Image (tube, grey):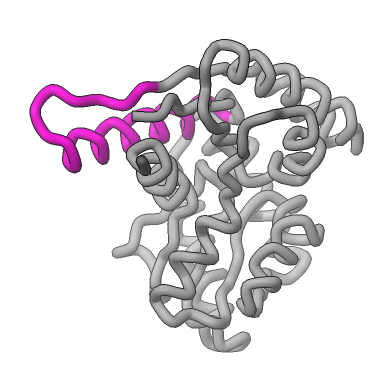
Amino acid sequence: MKMIGLIGGMSWESTVTYYQLINEAVKEKLGGLHSAKILLYSVDFAQIEQYQISGMWEQSAELLTDAAKSLEVAGADFIVICTNTMHKVAPQIQKALHIPILHIADATADVLLARGIRKTALLGTKYTMTQDFYKSCLMKHGIEVVIPNRQEIEIVNRVIYEELCVGIISEASRRKYCEIIDRLKREADAEAVILGCTEIGLLIKPENSVLTVFDTTRIHAEAAVAEALNG
């Protein structure tokens, strides 16, 4: 079994989910008392969030590169960045490593294509929804991406940072997210919705959505297990 290097803490709420999903999948595949071989480097999310707000992406890249190099030195065979947004700096981090980064958008695209999805809604932080680093990764796989309008983007982003990242699960926010998903289905002809922030799966479950839900946390965790057990 390969050693998985997790860069977590962005937020720790979703990192807990990664750890649980990875270990559950290893147990399911191998049985008995098996669990995953994991190294976890958990960063201080407050520092990352301030870099995001200030547009200091290079500083974020430096911080996460240090984390990734620490995991590599400690024996990780590959890196899993436990957040969608910070894949913006994945290319910079990869240049400093001798081991691969398992990219969350590539893993998600593979699952969508396997299900025949060619047009999807994307919910996430405002950075993930509006900037090209994530959408372009999906588009290179031939997947069309639609996002909420400007007002909805602000709502989705606010709920992530002010509620989900601090463990608040609001029924009112769930209803609002569902309304946004419903509109993207009706008006943009979306075939599915990507939960493109690792905390959104804490709020939106498949039974809440009129569109098929693709939870990137679960997809990424399952891809990590596949890689860990490969060879």
Quadrant including the C terminus: top left
Magenta span covers which residues?
11-37
The quadrant where residue 48 appears:
top right
- Magenta span has 17? yes
- Expressed as whole percent of the image width and height from the top left, the position of residue 185 reads 52, 82
Residue 171 in view of the camera: no
| Relative horizontal placement of residue 214, taking residue 82 as reference (left or right) | left
Residue drawn at x 66%, y 55% as measured from the top left: 155
Q: Looking at the picture, does residue 159 appear above or below residue 174?
A: above
Residue drawn at x 33%, y 39% as measured from the top left: 229
Q: Looking at the picture, does residue 98 appear above or below residue 137?
A: above
- Expressed as whole percent of the image width and height from the top left, the position of residue 66 reads 74, 17
Q: Looking at the picture, does residue 41 appear above or below residue 18?
A: above
The quadrant where residue 72 appears:
top right
The quadrant where residue 122 appears:
bottom right
Residue drawn at x 84%, y 29% as measured from the top left: 51
Outermost residue toward the left in this view: 32
Quadrant including the N terminus: top left
- Expressed as whole percent of the image width and height from the top left, the position of residue 42 reads 57, 18
